[in-house]
Image: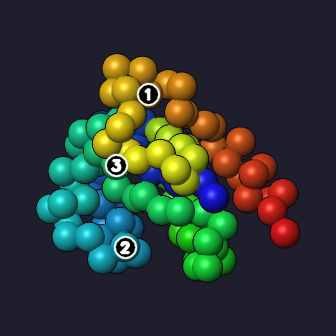
């Protein structure tokens, strides 16, 4: 399995985006705004892919990517193996864990 974490790649104060996160993921509106204002450090979605709830998780990821694309806000997506923990990552070198939206979509489409 794979773990992913998603943040806005750039700081954003777009209230419509904060509202999307609030409604879709039951985050507080202020918490959503705070995470978005942090840009690449404000990870607002983390999950394991390909687990028992993979259909729901894949739909969440697709909805995030599609919504942020409509707003022209790039995403920062990090991917790690299931055995790794987020807290153990080298914070000064996060690029090694970064995947593009296209790569993630391709991976999701290739799974049965």
Query: Is 75 on the left or on the right of 99, as rendered?
Result: left
Q: Are marks 3 and 1 in contact (CB under 8 Å)?
A: no
Disc 3 or 1, which lies upstream in sequence? 3
31 or 45, which lies in front? 45
| x then y, percent, for residue 98 | 54, 33
Badge 1 local density, few (<14 within 10 Å), some, or many (20+)? few
SS for dot 1: helix
Q: Which labelled disc corresponds to residue 25? A: 2
Badge 3 local density, few (<14 within 10 Å), some, or many (20+)? many
Query: Is 101 on the left or on the right of 5, as rendered?
Result: right
Disc 2 or 3, which lies upstream in sequence? 2
Inter-mark Cα distance, 2 to 1: 25 Å
Disc 2 or 1, which lies upstream in sequence? 2
Inter-mark Cα distance, 2 to 3: 13 Å
Q: Quadrant of residue 11?
A: top left
Q: Residue at x 42, y 21 (%)?
A: 93
| x then y, percent, for residue 62 | 62, 63
Quadrant in the picture for the C terminus:
bottom right
Residue at far top of view: 92
Q: Which labelled disc corresponds to residue 31? A: none
Q: Residue at x 53, y 62 (%)?
A: 48
Residue matched to label 3: 43
**Is residue 30 in view from this perspective?**
yes
Q: Residue at x 23, y 43 (%)?
A: 37
Q: Which labelled disc corresponds to residue 94? A: 1
Q: Quadrant of residue 28?
A: bottom left
Whether 26 is drawn above or below 86: the answer is below
Frontmost of labels 3 and 1 is: 1
């Amino acid at each position: 399995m794979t773990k992913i974490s998603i943040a806005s790649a750039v700081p954003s104060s777009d209230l419509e985006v904060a509202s999307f996160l609030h409604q879709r993921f039951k985050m507080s509106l202020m918490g959503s705004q705070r995470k978005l204002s942090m840009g690449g450090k404000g990870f607002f979605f983390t999950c394991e892919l390909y687990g028992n709830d993979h259909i729901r998780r894949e739909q969440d990821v697709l909805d995030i990517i599609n919504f942020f694309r409509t707003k022209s806000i790039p995403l920062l997506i990090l991917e790690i193996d299931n055995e790794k923990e987020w807290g153990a990552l080298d914070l000064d070198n996060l690029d090694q864990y970064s995947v593009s939206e296209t790569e993630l979509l391709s991976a999701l489409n290739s799974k049965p």
